[in-house]
Amino acid sequence: MSGLHTQGRIVSPGRLARRQWRRPLACIVLMSVLVGFASAAVGEVTLTPLMVEGEVAPGAAPPGESFRIIERPNYNDAGVLFVNGNLTGNGNADHFLFHGSAVAAQEGQDAPGVFGTYNTFDEFQTRRQINASGDGVFFAGIQQDTDIGSEATMLYRYNAVTGAVTPLASSDDPVGSMPPISNSSTSNGYAGIFSDGGFGLVGDIGGVSTSSDSAIFKNGIIAAREDDPVPPELGLGAGIKWDTNFSHVSWSASGDYAFYQDTNLSSSEDKVCVLVRAGTAMLLAQEGHTLPGGTSPVDKVFETTLADDGTWAIRGELDSGEFLATETGFYMESGGVIEDPAGLLDAGSILESITAIDINNNGDLIYAGVIHNGGTPTDIREGIFFNGELLLSTAVPVDGLPYGGTMVTNVFHDAAEAFDLTNFGEVVFQGSFLDGTGSVLDGVFRFAIPEPATGLMLLVGLGLVLGRRRGA
C-alpha cells in the first residue's frame, strides 16, 4: 500500500491533502473568532457597586441607618475603601467616615486628642488619603457639646489594624505639640499618608500674619510657606516668592508632592505647577507658557495627581480650551474627536472638558470628561476614559449597575480627586444613576479595565504554534 508515514501511522496522499486543507481553514475560522473577541473586549465595562445611597451603613449608630450622601472615595491596591458622607435621618449624628467594610467614625462620637472644651466629631472633610497598608489620614471638624456652632479642626491618622485614631495636627493645641493650623475648612486640606506612615497636609498657620500663613507640612515640618523664596532650581529668578494659599496638592507613597501656587512674578506668568521629588523641585507648568505638544499657553491648573511611585499627571485650562499632561508623555487638549472603540456614542463626538484624573505606577491614565455627543453641544454626556479611549458613558446601559439603571449627567459630584486607579487596573469612582423608578441615586462603583490585548495575545500564540508546525 502506497502512502506517507506520519508519526507512525500510514496516511494516504488524498487524506493528507484533505487534512492539510482543513487545517488552514480551521485556523482562519479560529483567528476570526479571536479577532472578534479582541475587538469586542474594548470598552466592555462591568460595574461592582461598593456603596449605594439607601443601603444600610454597617457599623453606624443607631443600627439600620443608611447612606445618603457619599463623597470622593479613596481605594488602595488591597481593595480597601476609605470615604466619608452623610447618613439618613440622624440629625446631629449624620456625618460618617467609612473604612474597609464599616463606619469607622461618626458625628457625635468622642474625638481623641482634643483640647479644652472641644470633644466630639462633627463633619469629615473630603481630601483624605489611604496607603497600601490601609492606614489613612483625614480632616475632621471637632465641636463642643455645649456650643454646637463652635468648631476646631483636626487632622487624624486612622490605623487599619487597631482602628485607633491619632491626632496629627490641630487648630486648638495650646501646648504646640502638633503642627499649628487655623480653624478653616477652606484653607486646610490635601492630606496625604506615606507608605512608612508619614503624613503631609496643607495648613493655614494660626496666629501668624495673614500675608504669610499658608504652608505645606511634611511629617509635621514646614516644607513650603507663603512668602518664602521659591527653590532656585525652578529657574524663576532672584527675589521670587510663594504668594497666597497653596492648592491642588497631591502626595506619593514616598512623600513626593505636587502643587499649584501663585508667585510674585508678573500677573501674566505668576502661577506655577511644581513637583518636589526627593527634595528637589521641578517646574511642571507655568501660566503664560506652552507645554510640549500644546497649541496655546497654560492659563491655570485645576488638579495634580501622583501615583504611588510619584509619576505625575496634571490637568488645567489653556488660553483656549483645556489640557491634560503626564510624565509619561501623554498630552491632549479638549475639543478633539473622541476615540470610542466600543461605539458608545454617535460618530464625531467631541470632548468638551476634562473633569477628573488619576495615574498609576504603570503610567496608565484614567480621566473623566464632558462630551458633546455626535458633536452636538445640546446633547451632553459624561464619560470615563482610559489612556485616551472611552470606556463608560452616561445615558448608556452598563452591566452591574443596580436596578438595571444608567449613569446620569452630572455623574461626578465634585469630580476633582473623585477617582482612584489602582496599580492592578481597577477604577473606583463616585457617580449618580437612575434606578428603576426614575429616581437619581448616588453610589461608589468599581470596575476592572478591560483587556483588549487578551485575544491578540492568543493570536500571537496561535501564530507561533502554526509557525512551529509548518517548520516541522
Image: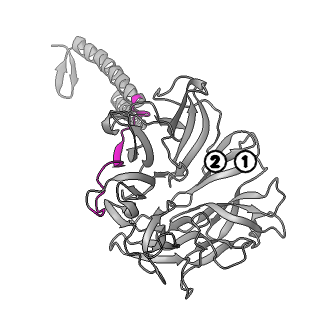
Estimate the x, y position of residue 230 in percent, counting from the top left: 75, 69
Q: Residue at x 38, y 37 (%)?
A: 439
Residue 119 left/right relative to 244? left
Asked whether residue 116 is drawn in magenta, I would say no
Instruction: Kindly check if marks 2 and 1 are in contact, taking CB atoms under 8 A apart as contact.
Output: yes
Q: How is the image coloured?
A: one colour
Name the residue carrying label 2. Answer: 325
In the image, 297 versus 17, the foreground residue is: 297
Element under label 2? strand
Residue that lies at the very extreme toward the front in this rendered image: 146
On screen, 377 above or below 185? above
Mark 2 vs mark 1: which is more N-terminal?
A: 1
10 Å neighbourhood of mark 1: few (<14), some, or many (≥20)? some
Stretch in magenta: 40-62
Identify which residue, 63 or 346, lies in the foreground. 63
Front in this rendered view, residue 204 or 448: 204
Q: Is residue 357 visible?
A: yes
Residue 58 drawn at (x, y percent): 28, 59
Badge 1 is on which residue?
A: 291
Is residue 423 at least partly visible in the picture? no
Q: For the stretch drawn in magenta, what is the main secondary structure?
A: loop
Amino acid type for the residue under numbered disc 2: Ala
Does 246 appear above or below 35?
below
Which residue is situated farthest in the left direction here?
Answer: 1
Q: Residue furthest bottom?
A: 175
